[in-house]
Image (cartoon, grey):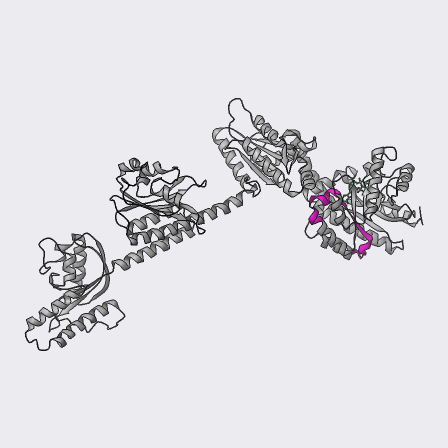
Amino acid sequence: MSTKLSHLGNDEADPTARLISASQRLISEAARLFPLASAQSERTIWLEAMIDEVPDYLYFKDRNSRFVVANRAIVNDNRREGLESLEGLSDFDIHPEHVARGFFETEQEIIRTGRAMLDMEELIRDSAGRLKWLLTSKLPVRNGEGEVIGLVGIARDITERKRSESLHVGQAHLLKMIALGAPLVEVFSSLILLIEAHVPDVLGSILMLAPDGKRMLSGAAPSLDPAYSALIDGVEIGPKVGSCGTAMWRGEPVIVSDIQTDPLWEDFKALVAPYGFRACWSSPIRSYQGKVLGSFALYAKSAGEPTAECMKLVGMATHIAGIAIERKEAEDSIQFMAHHDTLTGLPNRSMLDERVASAIEAADECGGGMTLAFLDLDNFKLVNDSLGHHAGDELLKIVAARMQNCVRASDSIVRLGGDEFVVLINGAMRKGESVEDRLRAVREAVAEPVVIEGRSFQITCSMGVAAYPEHGRNATELMARADAAMYRAKEIGRDAMQVFTAELANRAHEKLERQEELRRALAQGELFLQYQPQMDLATGRIFAVEALIRWRHPERGLIGPGDFIPLAEETGLIGPIGDWTLRAACRQNKAWQESGLPPIVVSVNVSARQFQEKDWVERVAAALAESGLEARYLELELTESLIMQDVQQAVETMHRLEKLGVHLAIDDFGTGYSSLASLKRFPVGRLKIDRSFVQDLPDDGDDAAIARAVISLAHTLQLRVIAEGVETREQIDFLREAGCDEIQGYYLSRPIDARALQAILCIPNL
Ligand SMILES: Nc1nc2c(ncn2[C@@H]2O[C@H](COP(=O)(O)O[C@H]3[C@@H](O)[C@H](n4cnc5c(=O)[nH]c(N)nc54)O[C@@H]3COP(=O)(O)O)[C@@H](O)[C@H]2O)c(=O)[nH]1
């Protein structure tokens, strides 16, 4: 065999070059070992003997692509009955036509061009029917004149390498699918097909363990008969439930080599028989922490055990399936958290729009309707305040579950936040039942007695109802109307259900108008302050004034705060209005001081919404800085109920205000629910006895007792006490005798303008 190989590179790292150089070395070694072998034929025998030892294919073909020489490796792999040598044959004699044609065309090109073709990857099927990947190089062979007389071929079996490469590519593809959030069934199917491609004669199946941990659920089995998969779906796992049910039950691989005889399959072998499976090898799929999530199984049609290589692949498959399931579970739980309320597990506000929109769509399609009810628990704050947030949370969970039990699967209960819920009644009702019946059932369920921390109590709710299409054409309209109806239900005394009406529509419209008017009032300076003096009972000195806001409406005249502060609170306008009040009061007090009047404290009312704003303390500081008023001449009146909304937060804010140097007072004392324990924590200077306890003094025994108790309590805590709403001499006498420190009320003066108040402040002592 003479081959001109000098034109090839001699890079030893190149596998083909290595092969070629190995055969060259082989030839020279033969020449070195047998220098004395004079006869050419003897030398050829030795040479062929050595070539036969090479595990790669080595052959020489003539110009017609017929084998002239072929080593044992290629002959063995293509052995057919009666075929001892390939000599004189072509690829058309040993390969299918389309494969042989490919080889032939390549070789003819080499012969025509005289150019070698290196490192070609070829797929063949050997005579045993095995698919083999070859890395082939074919080089032209020339005679002494340089003419191409044939070609030499060298081919190495790279099936193993290709297998592991395709496994890696398959794994990478699967991980990419998982990362991109492909549906679980697609990931599973690709995984099974990958394994099936690498393990001959098996069909794969993935089953998942249901969330109850008891049943098997279909995952994927792309090559199994769907009827068989359907038979397994939902079967309970157990100690003797075929391969998969037992593997999940035991949490370990279960290798059944013969389904027909294995006791684990006793109850299921009839089920599998029509499908012809004899062996089933199943391994549990586990989470990172080891929890069983499902099983990966391979079915074979002949009895037997898996090879070690097969079990290695199964190990890889269960690992990837575990990652996919865990990733899906994590994604599901993120999705769930984004759309559900963590406390009650109910859908949250983000789901509401979607559900209302699809309910409307469904109603349109069937020409039906839907109903939306806003529900607010009555006096829920009382539970929170008196029993603590933990009890409040418990109560919410209980009523949420009860409400959920009252509606059908097609309906929804949504928690908007706090104690606010929405009931969505979808589609037609059962015969003899109305939407009202169902909503009534929800209210009755809420009102059932609740036992929390050993205490039994009852909570009612107020409900506002709006129906589609009568009360609104879209989600926004319906929600606004149900909300308006709910407010009406609260207004008429709570524990009520109010359906949206035209009158309510007018009210809602009016409310919107008034809100705009109020916004304009602030912008156009229609708001102003009056001041009501406060007197020290011991000295008779006016030591402070309370700033009270008023609205001079261009058409409706003077409007008191009771008529617009609640609206301002509801709409958030209280923020800018409160800021304005604070700044105006500070500025006025500073102006009085600058006019030479004795310094007094100005007391400003604070609403809950203002107090809860994050930067409120900074805004108080800014009002002081802007006016130049010293902090000790400003008092902030906080109501008991405001503080009790979130005692911890209130105490923190109060301490920050105290640091500024402003005084703090508790307004309307006695109407809220502050406990003695919490009262001790508040850095306040005085309590204001609510007007309702003063108005019937001294005759009303209960009020007298309350007033005395508040005074005594305040003094015990070293606080001063002021009584508001004092209108008569008798009230003053009573309060003085009971030890009250200060008074405020019409008896002294009605709230008056700054200028009028200035005149009073000039009077030395009243
Ligand atoms: N957040 C804010 N709330 C404010 C502001 N200004 C007032 N208010 C709150 O509005 C409520 C009603 O106030 P108003 O109509 O001004 O009534 C006050 C007094 O006029 C009234 N009063 C005073 N003395 C008597 C009396 O002898 N008899 C009688 N029948 N009424 C009297 O009491 C109101 C003062 O109450 P209080 O604040 O509790 O001391 C009221 O709750 C105000 O707090 C504001 O700027 N921001």
Residue 668 is covered by the magenta coloring: no
Left or right: residue 27 compared with residue 295: left
Residue at coordinates 6% horizontally, 71% vertically from top-left?
41
Determine the residue located farthest toward the top in the rendered image: 432
Q: Can the viewer see residue 524? A: no
The residue at 75%/53% (across/down) is: 657
- Residue 622 is left or right of residue 90, and the answer is right
Q: Nearer the viewer, residue 417 or 146?
A: 417
Q: Where 390 sits versus 658, above or below?
A: above
Q: Which residues are magenta?
A: 626-650
Q: Which sits in the foreground, 536 or 103?
A: 536
Q: Report ligand 1 position as a quadrant.
A: top right
Residue 561 x, y percent position in the rendering: 77, 40
Rendered-image quadrant of the N terminus: bottom left
Q: Report the label total.
A: 0
Residue plotted at (53% across, 43% down): 339
**Is-magenta flag for residue 637?**
yes
On screen, residue 721 versus residue 424, left or right, reads right
Q: Nearer the viewer, residue 20 or 677?
A: 677
Answer left or right for 376 relative to 121: right
Q: Name which quarter of the figure residue 562 lies in.
A: top right
Q: Position of residue 335 (x, y in %)?
A: 50, 45
Question: In terms of image quadrants, where is residue 499?
Answer: top right
Q: Vertical placement of 453 versus 367: above or below?
A: below
Q: Position of residue 92 (x, y in %)?
A: 13, 55
Does the rendering let one see residue 726? yes
Residue at image location 72% in from the left, 50% down from the top: 651
